[in-house]
Amino acid sequence: MIAGIAHINLIIPEGTLEEANEFYGNTLGLTPRPVPHLQKNRLAWFDIGTSGQQVHIAYGASEEESPRHPCFKIESPEKLLELQRRIWEHHEKGDKSSPRATDKPGEANSGE
């Protein structure tokens, strides 16, 4: 029987691995981990806390606007607000790795 998730694999456009590392590693705070030597600079892997679960990032065909997304379980309402603030701050920077759309902390959630 299935006991949990080992990893999820998310796809990104070719040439955007640096932006994915910035967002998943720095903004979301996931822990980067080594990828197989032959896949270096083509994949990114991140640990989700100490759960044994991972997020894998790989190149692939991707739509500009897509409903695909990961859904992370957050430790507490306070940690959720902290993460929302970090994501909002990254969105406000407006750099290449910034989320294009996000809810402003303290305002009604849009569901996106």
Image (cartoon, rainbow, N blue to C red):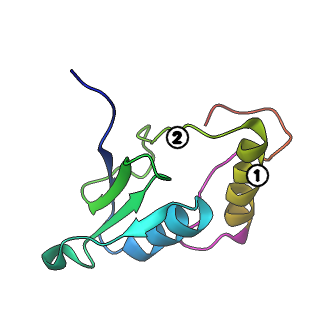
Extreme-right residue of the structure: 106
Q: Is residue 57 left or right of residue 110?
A: left
Q: Which residue is mark 1?
A: 82
The residue at the point 46 percent across, 52 percent down is 50
Task: Give, as a single range, the part of the protein colored magenta.
Answer: 93-103
| Farthest left residue in view | 38
Task: Work out whether 28 lies above or below 66.
Answer: below
- 26 falls in the magenta region: no
Q: Which mark is residue 26?
A: none
Q: CA distance from mark 1 to mark 2?
A: 14 Å
Front-most of 6 and 68?
Answer: 6
Q: Residue at x 44, y 37 (%)?
A: 67
Q: From the viewer's perspective, tell me whether residue 111 is left or right of residue 49.
A: right
| Residue 28 x %, y % | 58, 58
- Say what secondary structure mark 1 lies in: helix
Residue tagged by mark 2?
Answer: 72
> Callout 1, which amino acid?
Glu
Q: Are marks 1 and 2 in contact (CB under 8 Å)?
A: no
